[in-house]
Amino acid sequence: MATVSRRIIELQEYGSVQLPDGALSDEAAVMLHRHYAAQISLAPPSFLTNRCWQLTAQGYVGFIPVTPDLGISLKPKVPIANLFRMLEVAYSLREFRVFEGLVGVASLTDFYEHLAIILSRRVLDRCRRGIYREYVPYAETLPYMRGQLNLQPMLRAPWRVEIPCRYEEHTADIEENRILAWTLHRILRSGLCQETRALPSVRRAYRAMQQTVKLEPYGARSCVNRLYNRLNSDYHPMHALCYFFLDQSGPSHELGQDNMLPFLVDMPRLYERYVAEWLKRKLGDQFAVKAQERYAIDPGANLHFDIDLVVEERASGQVRWVMDTKYKAPSGGPASDDVQQVVAYAEAKGAREAILIYPKPLANPLNQRIGDVRVRTLTFSVEDELHEASQRFIQGLVQAKAAVSGEV
């Protein structure tokens, strides 16, 4: 049977492309409008678009399988090597030494496959050594005695023939393994792995897990803040990889007889995570860095702030900075709403310094005192060499600290 060749539309982040009226089917247009409005702004043919379909990429990069014969590749505006490094830092992938095997990897989908190979090989290695098991308690009514007799149900219904039992089973069908199985299942459905590269390894790993584990859906949050012991400590890095895959995997939609999954990286969110993790590494000895801290304004009315970054001095517990990352830099200076927002954050946390962080220098940077709060704009570039960019950022942060300390 002949395979359908998929046409790929390439869009750069925040860029636009126009397609002739007949180049986008109604099916594809409806799919984009219903499922991917946050990722792609779609304007139908009109006098405003020269009678063409106009597609404008928003702050996402990755791949969207729209129909069996059409896909959209969303390209990053940052250098691809920088994107890989941002993902490595944001998702704590350093221990996998992902850059050692990236020769010839030139796209985000190649990077996806590279990590899929790493995960599948680790799962297969663990399966060969024996997957982790736990004793799971059960309380069931059985036709035979197993474990301990559960007296309470028997006393309430002594006429029943079945025996209420409490017992424990040493099983591999536990959440630690189900997360691995679900992630491998999602990777297989992504359509991003090739038969000549990652697909055979991922398929073998999934089949190995499928023998002992029920398939249940899990979100990315299930992969973090888990407890490990000496018997399952090697699951920690595997779950870190699962977090990466599940966090970028969008909802599925029907493509013919198959369910295909998009692979989408939210760049503003990635930028925020990257800056947060980098600050934790660099400032961790003297400062505690808290990401997405919720500040309750009126708990009864569910009114709150979600502050991007709060940096506290470990010794005193005093908040030194509140920070807000803005991935899309304005053409001039910071927006008034952004300044108002970060000042409100600083006053709520009792901080003297509020910092707006942008990925490139602003034409009109800000360094002003507003009431008791000094507001600054700093640059943490992701388009330049990242090590040099981080050094420039830390220099600006130190200068900001010195300036505030010198104020009366």
Image: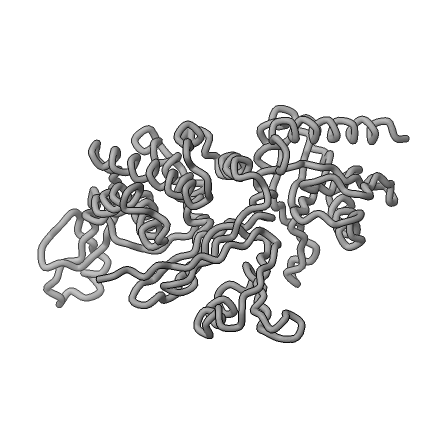
Q: Residue 203, position in %: x, y?
A: 25, 46
Is 32 placed above or below 283 here?
A: below
Which of these two is toward me, 159 or 180? 180
Q: Residue at x 48, y 66 (%)?
A: 35
Which of these two is toward me, 383 or 276? 383
Q: Residue 293, position in %: x, y?
A: 62, 45
Residue 170 located left or right of residue 198: left
Q: Residue 115, position in %: x, y?
A: 38, 39
Q: Residue at x 58, y 70 (%)?
A: 52
In which quadrant is the C terminus drawn?
Answer: top right
Q: Residue 48, position in %: x, y?
A: 67, 72
Which of these two is toward me, 306 or 19? 19
Is 185 placed above or below 310 here?
A: below
Residue 233 located left or right of residue 30: left
In which quadrant is the N terminus drawn?
Answer: bottom left
Query: Which residue is most to the right?
Result: 408
Query: Which residue is most to the top?
Result: 285
Where, by quadrant of the figure, is residue 398 drawn?
Answer: top right
Q: Is residue 136 visible?
A: no
Residue 124 located left or right of residue 52: left
Where, by quadrant of the figure, is residue 66 drawn?
Answer: bottom left
Indicate the colouring scheme. Answer: one colour
Q: Residue at x 26, y 34 (%)?
A: 126
